């Protein structure tokens, strides 16, 4: 990671992460503090990661006794950029 910037607050906020000679732009699409869930997506087509249509959900479940489970799931498609990684 070479840079990090955020714009806005709450749902709709955007963070831009510089990495791999490019940038990853993520948007907060949903935040539910009571359910302890947030959803974010990668919005830029020129993302250096080999994915497109990336959508991720993070859900935290309180197990009591100061412990929790973190479930981090995502969906995406491999993009044209993935061909670069297959030759590395």
Image (cartoon, rainbow, N blue to C red):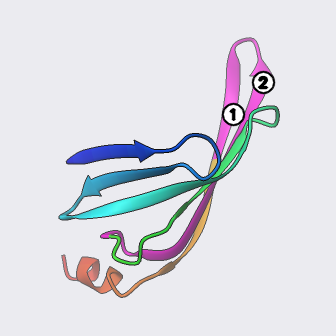
Tell me which residue sits at (20%, 82%) in the image. 87
Q: 51 above or below 1?
A: below
25 sits left or right of 30 in the view: left
28 sits left or right of 82 in the view: right
26 sits left or right of 74 in the view: left
Q: Please state the horizontal and vertical placement of residue 14, each as a whole percent of the image.
A: 48, 52
* Front-most of residues 8 and 61: 8
Q: Please state the horizontal and vertical placement of residue 45, each as a whole percent of the image.
A: 40, 78
Q: Assess whether mark 2 and mark 1 are in contact (beta carbons under 8 angstroms).
A: yes
Visible residue check, residue 47: yes
Pointer 1: what residue? 69
Q: Quadrant of residue 75?
A: bottom right
Visible residue check, residue 1: no
Instruction: Say whether residue 66 is magenta.
Output: yes
Label 1 residue SS: strand
Tell me which residue sits at (26%, 76%) in the image. 85
Pointer 2: what residue? 63
| Mark 1 vs 2, N-terminal side | 2
Tell me which residue sits at (30%, 62%) in the image. 23
Q: Quadrant of residue 9?
A: top right
83 sits left or right of 34 in the view: left
Q: Quadrant where the C terminus lies? A: bottom left
């Amino acid at each position: 990671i070479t840079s990090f910037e955020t714009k806005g607050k709450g749902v709709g906020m955007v963070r831009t992460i510089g990495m791999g000679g490019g940038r990853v732009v993520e948007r907060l699409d949903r935040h539910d503090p009571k359910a302890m869930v947030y959803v974010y997506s990668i919005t830029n087509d020129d993302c250096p990661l080999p994915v497109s249509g990336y959508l991720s959900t993070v859900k935290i479940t309180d197990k009591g006794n100061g412990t929790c489970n973190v479930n981090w799931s995502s969906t995406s498609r491999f993009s044209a950029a993935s061909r670069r990684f297959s030759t590395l």
